[in-house]
Image: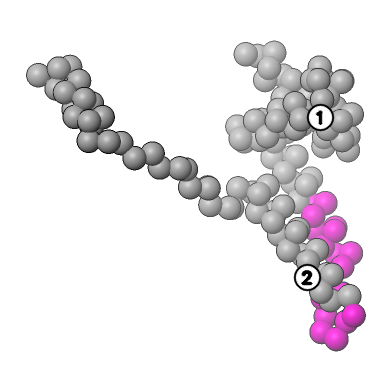
């Protein structure tokens, strides 16, 4: 488990240094960029370590720099206003995802039949008479 954790941490460190996931994958030992991306996501879910906080802070800083680049275009009567609004919406979506502000997606609800409910009830009654 520790080896996996260390790989996750290394992915975050390399990503914070500016490497792309396709560059990180062979360095850390993943087959492709998807493995490195998933490792980064798993590590970020832990959210308990300084490197995770630093990674988030770095990405928030990058998002703010991106925002500064088009902020003046958001002013009324600017021809590029609609493009700037779209850019702002994309930055906000990424920011929300990074900070975990989005509500979780609802899970599919599986309906149980009456027979399944009775069987579960009977099993529970057998365990706890």
User: If you read the primary sequence from the N terminus, does the residue marked by circle 1 or circle 2 appear first?
Assistant: 1
Res. 9 in view: no
- Find residue 4 and name its label: none
Q: Residue at x 87, y 20 (%)?
A: 27
Indicate the position of residue 23 as horizontal and vertical percent values: 89, 29
Q: Residue at x 16, y 23 (%)?
A: 122
Q: Is residue 55 left or right of residue 21?
A: left
Indicate the position of residue 42 as horizontal and vertical percent values: 65, 30
Residue 89 shown in magenta? no
Q: Main secondary structure of the magenta part?
A: helix
Indicate the position of residue 9 as horizontal and vertical percent values: 73, 25
Q: CA distance from mark 1 to mark 2?
A: 30 Å
In the depicted structure, whether residue 33 falls above or below residue 86: above
Quarter of the image where the C terminus is located: top left
Give the labeled residue for mark 1: 33
Magenta stretch: give its range.
61-79
């Amino acid at each position: 488990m520790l080896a996996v954790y260390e790989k996750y941490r290394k992915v975050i460190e390399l990503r914070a240094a500016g490497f792309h996931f396709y560059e990180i994958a062979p360095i850390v030992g993943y087959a492709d960029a998807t493995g490195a991306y998933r490792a980064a996501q798993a590590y970020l879910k832990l959210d308990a370590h300084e490197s995770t906080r630093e990674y988030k802070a770095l990405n928030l800083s990058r998002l703010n720099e991106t925002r500064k680049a088009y902020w003046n275009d958001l002013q009324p009567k600017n021809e590029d206003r609609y493009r700037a609004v779209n850019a702002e919406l994309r930055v906000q979506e990424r920011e929300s995802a990074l900070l975990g502000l989005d509500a979780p997606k609802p899970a599919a609800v599986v309906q149980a039949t009456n027979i399944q409910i009775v069987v579960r009830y009977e099993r529970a009654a057998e365990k706890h008479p």
